[in-house]
Image: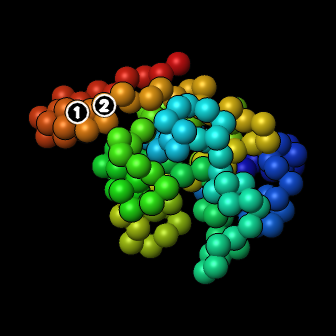
Amino acid sequence: MHKDEARIKRLFPSYFELFKLPDGAGEEEIQVYRACKTCKCDKESFTPSYEEKGFKHNEGDDPDDPGQYSLSTYEKPKDCKRFVKLNSEFQKPYKIAFGITHPQYGLVQRTKERKIKYKSSHVDYWLYEEATPYEKFEMIEDFDSYLEIYKKEREGGNWCERQLV
């Protein structure tokens, strides 16, 4: 795991004893997108899956899967949009925020780094207790327009996402 394993364990919520963080999880700043249920960058929209489910697993969930305990984010906006379209908890207009993962709030890992043939840009973000990652995110007001511009500029090689402080 990480070189400061003992220090990091103290920073995580107590339920982190239920699973093992994957090899390769670490402190990294990654530009990501997060679907926001409250349509705001707030604690409720940035609650990890396990907490969101009332500290329980859905039927069929693997309790040993570290992804069950993370905050789901995506490096590509189209993957985040695909997620909200498939999830009945989100209604149009979808509210998606853009920001950066920060080591002060937890550890991250691109899911494809541990899953063979995983094509999504999903990033697991395991948050420390009392973390406020939403402070490093901003809402995208018109996501469909944003996505259209993103696609055009990516095709032209001119896309440069804003760096958030």
Residue positioned 25% across, 38% down in the render: 144
Which quadrant holds residue 45? Answer: top right
Residue positioned 61% across, 62% down in the render: 67
Residue 92 visible in the picture = yes
Say few, some or many: other residues with alpha carbon within 10 Å of mark 1 (under 14 / 14 to 19 / 20 or more).
few
User: Residue 77 in the image: x percent, y percent?
Assistant: 34, 44
- Figure check: 138 above or below 127: above
For badge 1, the amino acid type reads: Ser
- Figure check: 20 above or below 131: below
Q: What count of labels does the image hold?
A: 2
Q: Is residue 66 left or right of residue 163?
A: right
Residue placed most toward the observer, 25 or 85: 85
The secondary element bearing badge 2 is classed as: loop
Residue positioned 74% across, 67% down in the render: 56
Q: Is residue 165 left or right of residue 82?
A: right
Residue 157 visible in the picture = no
Q: What separation in Å lies between label 2 and label 1 (alpha carbons)?
A: 6 Å
User: Residue 60 in the image: x percent, y percent?
Assistant: 61, 80
Q: In the rendered structure, find residue 142 and report the number of the disc placed on it.
A: 2
User: Residue 22 in the image: x percent, y percent?
Assistant: 65, 62
Residue positioned 45% across, 60% down in the render: 88
Q: In the rendered structure, find residue 73 and report the number of the disc placed on it.
A: none
Q: Label 1: which residue?
A: 145
The secondary element bearing badge 1 is classed as: helix
| Placement of the N terminus among the 4 image quadrants | bottom right
Residue placed most toward the observer, 85 or 24: 85
For badge 2, the amino acid type reads: Asp
Tell me whether the residue at label 2 lies in contact with that at label 1, contact meaning CB atoms closer than 8 angstroms: yes
User: Residue 147 in the image: x percent, y percent?
Assistant: 25, 38
Which quadrant holds residue 85? Answer: bottom left
Residue placed most toward the observer, 146 or 124: 146
